[in-house]
Image (cartoon, helix red, strand yellow):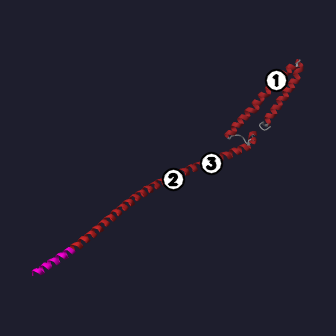
Amino acid sequence: MGLLDRASVLWGVAVAVVLAVVCAVVAPLLGLEPASILIGLVVGLVAAGGFLIVRVLEPTERGLKALNDGTLADDHPLQAQCRQLLADARAGRALVETLSGSADKNAISAAQVSFAADQLKLRLDRQVEETAQMAEYAGQITETVRESSEQATDAATMALQNKQVSTEGREALISAIDSVRAVHQQSG
């Protein structure tokens, strides 16, 4: 009796009793044969099916629509039958709202992490460029120091050669002076 309210059950019982009484009274008066009773049974089943559609299925469909809309009365039989289902649906809806909020926050956090990673990559690229430039400058400095060292070596070699030439010139000058003295002493 879960989906049937009290009025539906009472109407169904009343219609069944009335049809049973009418069939029991009318069948002997009309001299009905078993085929006639079978036809009556089929008519009764059709009437019961129509009653089921009109009094049970259609109100149930209206009740389901009201349940979906949230306008179902608290005393409606569907409300009692679907209480756990409704509670689970509310919990699911709350979970979806919570997860959608978390998903938004996660997306924002992921975007922030991506932005920070991009900024870090730019900084690292800049540092690599600056390091390469410093290495180039260090190479230039090393080349300049090597050239200066070669020039200093060349200057030291020239100074040594100049010293030797100077020493030889001095000795030649001393020898010339001695010769001039000797000539002067002989002439004089």
In the rendered view, would you say 136 is above or below 93? below
Badge 1 is on which residue? 42
Badge 3 is on which residue? 99
Image coordinates of residue 136 in percent, x first then y, are 39, 58
Q: Nearer the viewer, residue 122 or 98?
A: 122
Image coordinates of residue 188 in percent, x first then y, are 9, 81
> Which residue type carries mark 1?
Val
Q: Which badge, 1 or 3, is on the more N-terminal residue?
A: 1
Disc 3/disc 2 C-alpha distance (Å):
26 Å
> Which residue type carries mark 3?
Leu
| Residue 131 as seen in the image, left or right of residue 33 | left
Label of residue 117 in the image: 2
Disc 1/disc 2 C-alpha distance (Å):
79 Å
SS at circle 2: helix
* Residue 43 among those drawn in magenta: no
**Who's the residue at 28% across and 70% down the image?**
160
SS at circle 1: helix
Q: Which residues are magenta?
A: 171-188
